[in-house]
Amino acid sequence: MSDIPSAPSSSIHPAEFDFGLPPFDLLTAGEREGLASALDIGIYAKGRPLLTRDEPVDALFVVLRGSVLERHGGEAAALHGPGDRFDLAALYGAGPARSFVAAEDTVCHLIPRPALEAAARDNPAFGAAVLGAFAQRMSDLAGERSNREMAALTMARIRQAYLHPPLFVPGTASLRDAADAMKRGKASSVLVRDSGPDGGERIGILTGTDLRDLVVLEGRSVDAPVGPLARYGLLTLDRDDLLFNALVLMTKHAVRRIVVTENGAVVGLLGQSDLLAVLSNHSQVIGLQVEHATDPEDLRRASLSTVELIRTLHATGVKVAFIADLVTELNRRIFRKLFELLAPPDLLANSCLIVMGSEGRGEQLLKTDQDNGLILRDGYHCPDLPRIAADFSRHLVAFGYPPCPGGIMVSNPDWTRPLAAYKDAIFHWIHRPDEAAQMNLAIFYDAAAVAGDPALLDEAKGYLLGRLQDNQMFFTHFARPTLAFDTPSGLFAALFERRRAEPVDIKKAGIFPIVHGVRALALEKRMTETNTVARIWALAELGALDRKLAGDLAEAFAILSTIRLKARVDSPADGEAGTELAIDNLVRLETLGKLDRDQFKDCLALVKSFKDTIAYHFRLNH
């Protein structure tokens, strides 16, 4: 962990550690001696990273001399000076991604995790001061995220819920006619158009419960007209009203449905169960559904709930990066639970289920092609593995994840194999880099572990990074797909000429060049980050990417991802609640608002410039 570029560690001794600093002043003399004997020293030249995003951490840093700049998402968040300590969040795998860079020549004491935990265990007051406060901070952060998400959900509009189509009968229709209409329309109520006392039209409602009470309990004739028997003075809300208001109205009047209008006309009925279905699409609720799932059908329902979560959060203005974090977490829980339901314990202990591509990078919002695989421990054999792998892929299709056209799925033996076979494949991808090999290497570089033993993936990725050489030809080949698709620049002129511009494939024209160009730079630097934005800022911290360009790229990536999601959520084909979001990357410029159009134009211009940067850096035009 220590990076010692400029001074011998022998010039500094752990005895220099200041035990007068809170909370270390709570330790006894013996406990101080034990902790001092475990201390390590790290010396860092100005500008050198101490910790980068997603880097494994096994010690607590305490600044002795100098200062350390902490960044969140590329933004300066704090400056740590002598006596300050960090990074408990990374040590215990919590909190947002962050990085630490020496703001000047800096010396830090490093307290190994075992020594820190031993001191906390032996001295409860010290443990409470160090780990207890940390736990509370993490709890506060989790609560803040939960509150933000719930606030977004309670700001959802009625139009985001499923509305039952209005089913009308005239006031002269009989109770039998009303019952027949409900049966044919598969409805639990009908709306009644009748003449009011003042001679004008009025609309009432007759429910299945009303029919039962009128006919069975009161003995009404089934030929009696519904007009005088319907209930009038309906509870109505506009389609753009808040779902929360509908919940309050239903609760106040003890009813199970309200009538929804738009521009004064009745457009449907909102049932209590449909309202609650939207408001219950909180990530914690979905997480509990996954946790308590006992069969794949339970998981399928939870998976469909994530679609409604995406719709609701997007409609209430939540940023795409936040939505992606939630969806990534929920998807991986679903994949993990499905694998645990299908795999015997010995397979779980001797394999690592991985997701790749956009799912591995934590950027998948839409349910695009499956990109997954299984790494087996060398020497392990599971006789039933082909059936288990086929069932896993089949169930994911039922969950809404289409099969991968390239066959990158656990059901394909090429992606379910021992670690040694993966290493052989990686060797081939690096040293015989045809087009397919380059694609496989790129996809695997983005892999993340979701179930089983993650050490298997760590070893495979370590092998990948260790085999890379400073071979200009290899990186030229690897980076070349960045330029594979055209990024149009003149298409916006059509809008000003009153012509319909051709749809733009936003993934090929904008998102993919950023993802792959950044991926090529990250691979060249042997980085372990998988997320595109995390790679962008890590490259900036190393000086491999201009900081202004890094900021522009991160912003453009967020804007393009937002436009892509908005195009899918707002698509007429996706208008019904409970349906999947279509896998279509085409953006039709005439459907964009002026702000989105201007941002899209600026983003594409930046992407063209970035492609030129990549072409120059990797000598793609030579």
Image (spheres, rainbow, N blue to C red):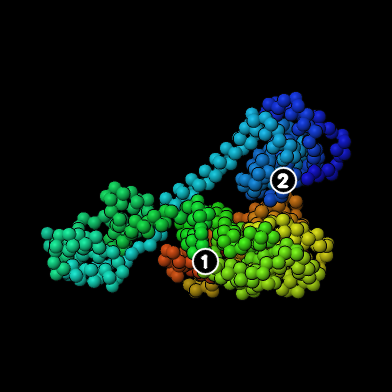
Residue at mark 2: 57
Q: Position of residue 88 (x, y in %)?
A: 66, 40
Q: Secondary structure at mark 1?
A: loop
Residue 222 quadrant: bottom left
Say what amino acid the circle numbered 2 marks: Val
Q: Position of residue 231 (x, y in %)?
A: 20, 58
Query: Going 41% across and 57% down the picture, which residue do you hit?
Result: 277
Residue at mark 1: 399
Q: Is residue 406 left or right of residue 599?
A: right
Query: Going 58% across and 72% down the picture, which residue do you hit?
Result: 403
Q: Is residue 556 left or right of residue 478?
A: left
Residue 374 makes an appearance in the image: yes
Residue 378 quadrant: bottom right
Q: Position of residue 346 (x, y in %)?
A: 66, 60
Mark 2 / mark 1, whichever is N-terminal: 2
Taking 585 as reference, is 258 above or below it?
above
Taking 484 as reference, is 328 above or below it?
above
2 or 1: mark nearer the eye? 1
Count neighbours of disc 1 (C-alpha within 10 A) and say few if under 14, some if 14 to 19, many if 20 or more. Answer: many
Q: Is residue 552 left or right of residue 289?
A: right
Q: Quadrant of the C terminus?
A: bottom right
| Marks 2 and 1, how far apart at CA | 36 Å
